[in-house]
Image (tube, rainbow, N blue to C red):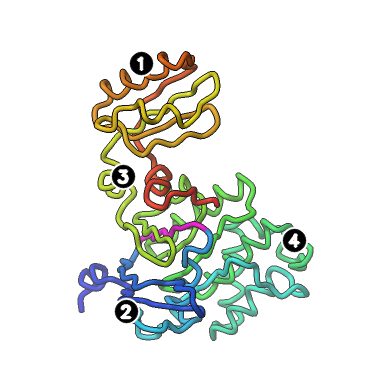
Amino acid sequence: MSYLQARMKPLLKADSLVKRYGDILAVNDISFEINRGEIFGFLGPNGAGKTTAIKIMSGLLKADSGSVTIDSSDSRSSIGICPQHIVLWENLTCLEQVVYMGRMYDLSSYESDRRGRSLLEALGLYEYKDRLARKLSGGMQRRLNIILALIHSPGIVFLDEPQAGLDPQSRILVRDYIRSIKNLTTVVLTTHDMEEAEKLSDRICIIDKGKLLISGTANEIIRTAGHEDLIEADIEGDITHDLIPFLDPELISDITISGTRISFNNKNPLAAMDNVLRTIKEHNLKVNSLQLRRKSLEDIFISLTGRSIRE
């Protein structure tokens, strides 16, 4: 197989994965492919089945049915895993951690040390290389956990909530580093941050209640599921659901009321805005602001699942 053919062939194929925990169907017949050299965002709310799916893909958990195929001559050494919960040796220093992990992957002492120092530098931990893990901040421990998943230069790395607990500067550092390695290491990540996922991921897969809802690039998902624009109005006064029956269902759909804010999809922006303004005026309410905007990935997520990803 030529280099070009290898690059075009999916690195990972998941086919009809199913996993139950008693009566709970955690993963419900999902199938997808992950290509070499891409960042694949695996998104969903808490309890959606993301972590279970990652455990199956990485070989930590056996599916009840279905299969995962990774195109590699040695799949174990080609996989890196950074779990959602931090796993470190508390009584080892940062450098000792990464060297020890490298040796576990059969790297030489020299190569483990060389790669470890390089990764510590890249993720802003080199000056703490001699500090014990238990004395690091939570954000530093998170970055060290990511380094342990990358020490052996895996072909694919699974990062489960890699930016959880990071301050804004560390989030940017981790985001930029993930981008920098994707040509060498395919990245599969889960996140609760839709904006971050939209910025970082080449393709996105959204699941909820174990089912795959939609997949594609962020723009493809927005075009497919977000073909209608979103109108948002901030209203002064008491907003109640009594407004809804007076809005034209031919123009307006998926109405959401939150506090003083009302939002909805629309098929004809000008006619929809006119209908909303007239209805609000008839109810003796005042509009503080009214805006028409393109749907975001999080808007799509909420319309598909009926809840925010952070719940």
Q: CA distance from mark 1 to mark 4?
A: 58 Å
Q: Does the magenta run of residues contain 180?
A: no
Dot 3 lies on which element? Answer: helix
Q: Is residue 135 left or right of residue 82?
A: right
Q: Earlier in the sequence, mark 1 or mark 4?
A: 4
Task: Mark 2: give few (<14), some (14-19) or many (20+) Cα within 10 Å.
Answer: some
> Circle 1 sits on which residue?
278
> Circle 3 sits on which residue?
222
In this view, the residue in front, 244 or 263, is 244
Are discs 1 and 4 less than 8 Å apart at CB? no
Q: CA distance from mark 2 to mark 4?
A: 37 Å
> Circle 2 sits on which residue?
71
In the image, which is nearer the foreground, mark 3 or mark 2? 3
Q: Does the magenta run of residues contain 41?
A: yes
Seen at 66% across and 60% down, the residue is: 126
Dot 4 lies on which element? Answer: loop
Disc 4 residue type (three-letter): Leu
In the image, which is nearer the foreground, mark 1 or mark 2? 1
> Circle 4 sits on which residue?
136
Q: Earlier in the sequence, mark 3 or mark 1?
A: 3
Are discs 4 and 3 less than 8 Å apart at CB? no
Seen at 61% across and 44% down, the residue is: 168
Q: Earlier in the sequence, mark 4 or mark 3?
A: 4
Quarter of the image where one finds residue 154 = bottom left
Dot 1 lies on which element? Answer: helix
Q: Earlier in the sequence, mark 3 or mark 2?
A: 2
Q: Which residues are magenta?
A: 38-45
Task: Mark 3: give few (<14), some (14-19) or many (20+) Cα within 10 Å.
Answer: many
Q: Is residue 60 left or right of residue 282?
A: right
Disc 1 residue type (three-letter): Arg
